[in-house]
Amino acid sequence: MSIVETFNGYIETTQDSLLVLEACRRCLLPKISRRLQEKERKLVRSGSVFVFDEKDSGIKRWTDGLVWSPSRILGNFLIYRELDKRIPKRKRALVDSGHTRLRSNSADQSTTDRHKERQLVGSLSDAYNFKEDGLIKKTMSLIVDGTPLHLISYYHPEDVVARKLRTPSAVPELVNLEISPELLVRQNFRIPPVVEPDQYAQPYYQTSSGYTAGTFSFFVFSIIERYLQLIFVF
């Protein structure tokens, strides 16, 4: 059975992730059923999004054939940058020190520009030999009914800036999905979604293009999440 990507676009916020995961639960979008074979790794490109759960797929560790930097936390996500090769440890420390001084004295990059850059590429320094025009990998993992569920997304920052990649929140077939309570367990998030309980005291919200009572809390959360991502990038 051939593998197809779950979604094509840019996962910007936690809301985007939850919309894709909910669509997978409803079989509106396909999950990955097995590990990518070598010939299928060409599917890994800017805009590719893959979702899999460890129980059904048997995948314990996602592999794509690319070389990645260590991860950095960005809100509820982990961010990785594609590498050509690693610089030796001693040289890495020297480059990192010099790079820090250079950036602190830079007058041609505003604070706002640096924040925007961090939202897209994370906070790793140039001590790593990043691949020119390399991909960014952005991931999120949840525990749903006792099973790890993973979302893996890839993008070129230039494609995001140029708005070549749509977000799930901009897709009419996805934006109005009601997110299942199983996906909203607070322990799964560093920045938990703010949701309203329904009549059965279950976590609940329904996304919408309008800011109705059922969506306002998560709309506010999305704004807060973007703000915290600008400030707290680890």
Image (cartoon, rainbow, N blue to C red):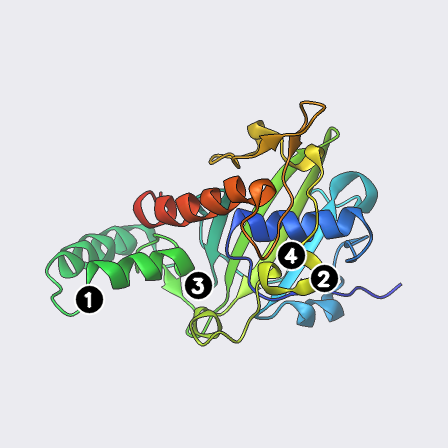
Marks 4 and 3, how far apart at CA: 40 Å
Marks 4 and 2, how far apart at CA: 6 Å
Could you tell which of marks 4 and 3 lies nearer the N-terminus? 3
Q: Mark 2 falls on what kind of element?
A: helix
Q: Residue at x 79, y 43 (%)?
A: 58
Contact flag, marks 2 and 3 (Cβ < 8 Å): no
Going by the numbered disc 1, the residue's amino acid type is Gln
Q: Residue at x 67, y 64 (%)?
A: 172
Q: Quadrant of the C terminus?
A: top left
Mark nearer the viewer, 2 or 3:
2
Mark nearer the viewer, 4 or 1:
4
Q: Tag 2: Cα neighbours inside 10 Å, few (<14), some, or many (≥20)?
A: few
Going by the numbered disc 2, the residue's amino acid type is Glu
Which residue in the protein does label 3 denote?
85
Q: Quadrant of the N terminus?
A: bottom right
Q: Tag 4: Cα neighbours inside 10 Å, few (<14), some, or many (≥20)?
A: some
**Residue 229 percent location from the top left of the image:** 38, 47
Please tell me which residue lies in front, 94 or 35.
35
Which residue in the protein does label 1 denote?
109
Marks 2 and 3, how far apart at CA: 41 Å
